Amino acid sequence: MATTIGPVSNALSAQAANLLREALPVAKLADTLAATVKQSGGEAGQVAQAAIAAQPHAPAAQALGNVQMLVAISALSPQEERRRMQADHARRGLDSLDKLHGELLDGEVDPATLKELVQWLGRERDVADMSDESDSQFDALMHDIELRVRVELAKFDIEI
């Protein structure tokens, strides 16, 4: 199965590769500094001088580029962030349902699991408010998970 990578993923991959290329000199600097510390017996003055001498002199533009790359990698669009939060929420709901299923098979249900499901339903309203109308399949899936949670809680006379 072929995986398609979007333009954002391609850009992030390229930025990550650039960061790795820039990290190699830092690793070499750390090795040089560690060797100097070992040779000098760890005297503070010599260690500081070795660190200053071994430090690569990067232009300010390169440093600014590094910061910009880090910000670009860490920043998600609001839609991507919303989608990630919704997926995490759905995963937590399914995990709680799976945990309840296992406990039912064992014959003993932990009240904490039921409380987890009640709390999940409370957060469901917040996540539903973030919903994007453009993805009806995801909304239908979330509705199915919510319905299953309500059914399982109703078996224990818990209604929300």
Image (spheres, grey):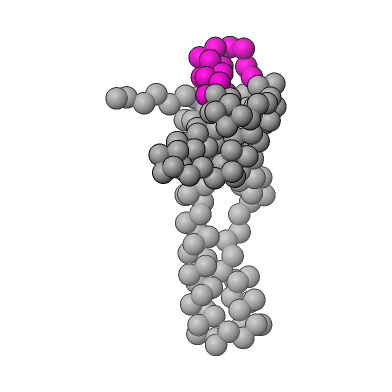
Residue at 50% from the left image edge and 58% from the top image edge: 25
Looking at the image, which is closer to me, 30 or 12?
12
Point out the residue furthest to the left here.
Answer: 1
x%, y% of residue 82?
A: 63, 27
Task: Inspect the magenta stretch and tell me whether residue 143 lies in it.
Answer: yes
The residue depicted at 52 percent of the width and 67 percent of the height is 30
Front-lying residue, 6 or 64: 6
Place of residue 26 in the rendered image (x, y in percent of width and height, measured from the top left): 53, 60
Residue 103 image position (x, y, % from top left): 46, 42
Q: In which quarter of the image is the C terminus?
A: top right
Magenta segment main secondary structure? helix
In-image side of 20 versus 118 (left or right): left
Q: What stretch is highlighted in magenta?
A: 130-148
- Can I make out residue 85 in this image? no
113 vs 67, nearest the viewer: 113
Identify the residue at image location x=61%, y=54%: 58
Magenta region includes residue 112: no
